[in-house]
Amino acid sequence: PGGSQRWKTKRWDLDRWAKLCDVLAERGFQVVVTGGPEERSIGAALTTQMHSKPLVLIGKTTLSELACLIKRCAVFIAHDSSTLHVATAVGTPTVALFGPTNPKRHLASTFRGRIITKPVFCSPCYSTSCRTITHACMTRISVEEVLTAVLATVPATPRSEHLSPPATVPTA
């Protein structure tokens, strides 16, 4: 849920991450939250908003370990971030949330998954601070929409090496 300190405009609201994680946990998913060591405070803020207890691995994996973890997941949820590209590199089906940047420009041709982006007049703006103050490109992405994309992605990925039950990794 974190990501680059410079690109906070790419982030989806923590309250939405918390609701999504709780709904996924209620449906039997093992939710795993990842991020770099500098994102520990974001992880703490997220988990205090949640009712379920995710596996929090923020700052606890090397890049290689993170790639291995993501590869074992049934689906990976991320906004435009380095971990989104790791998921693409290891072939994990992904639900990608895009706001101020253009997915056509940034996603690799090997991307497997679903892209959620909202057509707003100012996007893609490539700005590190929202010029309209509304952050509509990200706030218009609903929890229900992401959940629908996740559920539509999971059945299409019968991979025996996944964690059981299917793991979801919301990350930066």
Image (cartoon, grey):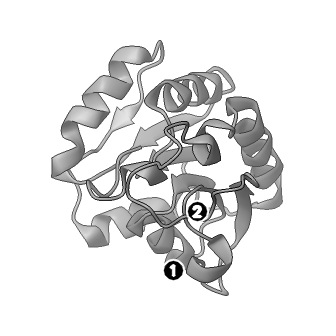
Q: Name which residue lies at 55% across and 45% down.
A: 167
In this view, the residue in front, 48 or 155, is 48
Q: Is residue 84 left or right of residue 42?
A: right
Report which residue position mark 1 lands on: 89
Q: Amino acid at mark 2?
A: Glu
The vertical placement of 6 against 144, above or below, is: below
In this view, the residue in front, 7 or 156, is 7
Which label belongs to residue 11? none
Q: Quadrant of residue 113?
A: bottom right
x and y percent of residue 16 in the render? 55, 28
Q: Amino acid at mark 1?
A: Ala
- Crowd tier of the residue under label 1, counting other residues whose Cα lies within 10 Å: few below 14, some 14–19, many 20 or above: some
Q: CA distance from mark 2 to mark 1?
A: 17 Å
Report which residue position mark 2 lands on: 161
In this view, the residue in front, 16 or 30, is 16
Work out whether residue 84 can be spotted. Answer: yes
x and y percent of residue 24 in the render? 63, 30
